[in-house]
Image (spheres, grey):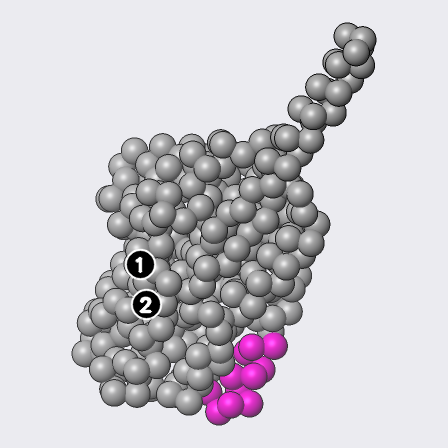
Amino acid sequence: MKTTAIAALLATALAAVPAAAQETTLRLVSAFPENSIYVKRLENWIEKLNAEGKGVLQITFIGGPKAIPTFEVGKSVQGGVVDMAMSTGAFYTNVFPESDALKLTQMPVAEQRTNGALALVNKIWGEKGNMFYLARIVENQPFHLYINKQIATPDLKGLKIRITPVYRDFFGSMGATLMQTAPGEVYTALERGVVDGYGWPVGGIFDFNWQEKTKFRVDPGFYDAEVSLIVNLKKWQSLTAKQRELLQRQALNFEGRNDFWKAYAQEEVKRQAAAGIQTIRFDEATSRKYVQQAYETGWAGIIKLSPQYGPQMQKVFTKK
Ligand code: 173
């Protein structure tokens, strides 16, 4: 055989090998229960990604908290037990405390990508969590206090409230007795009267039937619920440029959906009213103070836990 023919044969053989080896599969878990809207949207996204990612990258959805408990998901991503997760920072403060600060962002995620906020997030997530912060897939979802006792002022003394780290400093500052649970345990806690109320975003309570055990929603809402896709950093770095490009492009497409979340928030408020959930509203000055106190106590908590990064995050997360 001529050298050129051999070279040509070799070239095709070599091209064939990497092509086959180029497809990789990432294992993903959800820190939220499988019946939540976040997981439903996630599953649709994975289906689309897998259709478009044939030969490049696939994602296998392992499951929700039955596979890995809510508050252990972050550690599993950090250690590489799984490659990816859908979670919220409040669920992995046991990896690094800055994770809970994402609730305090005051601009759309699109703007966080250009104003340096997400650059800082990725620096911290990489350094302290061995994580790549891929995309924020929920926004425009303020948190609320849901409660079963009528209150006239933001005074929660004598009331037991279910929390995650999201609400700890704020609800604590109003005198509440705090009880931390994963979302999967809220229904039982309400049913048994172990708690008088709970924190949750404006949308999603029907996914878990909490409307059956909820009398009031307190307005206004505060902060902005953050749900994100995180990837084990070593795994992210081990992907080929093509795989990374596919995953990042699909994730950014999933990310920019603030109109969906805005409309969903409005629908959920209506649906709550139709289900008999009453609204508790404070007067204007009290409402303003309530939201202000939420941010002040929230930031004080973050800065106390992270004197290094807290102030830097506050600077880029706060609306000018
Ligand atoms: O479980 C929670 O109340 C919580 O912290 C959270 C965070 C983001 C979205 C939904 C719930």
> Does 300 appear above or below 70?
above
Q: Which residues are magenta?
A: 267-278
Q: Position of residue 189 (x, y in %)?
A: 28, 81
Residue at 52% over, 44% down = 134
- Could you say whether the residue bearing mark 1 is in a helix, strand or loop? helix
Q: Position of residue 102 (x, y in %)?
A: 43, 50
In the image, 22: left or right of 15?
A: left
Q: Determine whether label 2 and label 1 are within 8 Å by CB.
A: yes
Q: Is residue 268 magenta?
A: yes
> Does 207 appear above or below 75?
below
Residue at 56% over, 61% down = 42
Distance from disc 2 to disc 1, alpha carbons, whole Å, reads 7 Å
Residue at 46% over, 59% down = 62
Q: Position of residue 15 (x, y in %)?
A: 70, 27
Residue 182's tag is 2
Q: Which residue is mark 1?
A: 71
